[in-house]
Image (cartoon, helix red, strand yellow):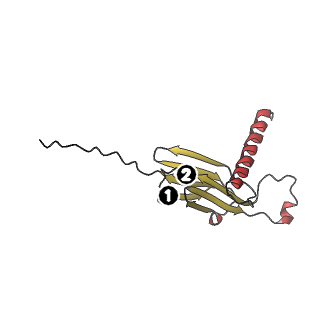
Amino acid sequence: MTTLYEPWNLISQLQRELERKQEMNNGIAEGASATAEWVPAVDIKEEPERYVLLADLPGVNPTGIDVGMENGILTLSGKRETEAKSQRDAYKRVERHFGTFHRRFSLPDTVDAEGITAKYANGVLEIVIPKKSVVQPKKIVVVSEG
């Protein structure tokens, strides 16, 4: 079996990790918890009637995930428990992050905060943020009196 060496994949992986570190630093500057130990990867998709946020949280107990919305800011936080120290000592390489995480997202005024839902399956947290229904402008007819 031949393994193909692709240096661009390593560069792309490094770039993604640096972007996530920068996001974490920006989050701390914006008021995120300075005690966050890792930053989960998040994808945000806009659809005509909603936004969908997908966060990679493998190994996180869903009961330990906190999702909140206040003043237009969606907050996602929680903790991934570490393995016992004696188990970790046998590893030669550890790339998975453990400990607390904290992410904040500014949402537009067009979202329906009351309709936000979250579900966790297969290590992915899906947060659905519906948009408010658009009120159509009303045409007012001017009536002539004479």
Mark 1 or mark 2: which comes first in sequence? 2
Q: Nearer the viewer, residue 122 or 7?
A: 7
Instruction: List x then y, in percent, for residue 127.
Output: 56, 55
Q: Is residue 6 visible?
A: no
Percent across and percent down for residue 122 are 63, 55
Given the current orientation, which residue lies at the most extreme left position? 146
Residue 105 in sight = yes
User: In this picture, is 95 found above or below 146?
Assistant: below
Residue 144, numbered label:
none
Residue at the image position 71 percent from the left and 55 percent from the top: 28
Q: Are marks 1 and 2 in contact (CB under 8 Å)?
A: yes
Question: Left or right: where does residue 93 sit relative to residue 39?
Answer: right
| Quadrant position of the C terminus in the picture | top left
Is 123 left, or right, of 99 in this rendering?
left
Q: Quadrant of the N terminus?
A: top right
Which residue is denoted by mark 2 in the rendering?
107
The single residue placed furthest to the front in the displayed view is 146
- The amino acid pointed to by label 2 is Leu
The residue positioned 69% from the left and 53% from the top of the image is: 27
**Circle 2: element type:** loop
**Residue 88 placed where, x, y %?**
84, 61
Q: Amino acid at mark 1?
A: Ala
Image point (52%, 53%), residue name: 128
Which residue, given by chain and number where applicable, does mark 1 sit on? 113
How many other residues sit within 10 Å of disc 1, few (<14), some (14-19) or many (≥20)?
A: many
Secondary structure found at label 1: helix
- In the rendered image, the vertical position of residue 105 relative to residue 12, given as above or below: below
Residue 140: quarter of image: top left
Between 90 and 14, the residue placed more toward the observer is 14
Residue at left 67%, top 49%? Answer: 41
10 Å neighbourhood of mark 2: few (<14), some, or many (≥20)? some
What whole-number distance in Å separates the C-alpha atoms at marks 1 and 2? 9 Å
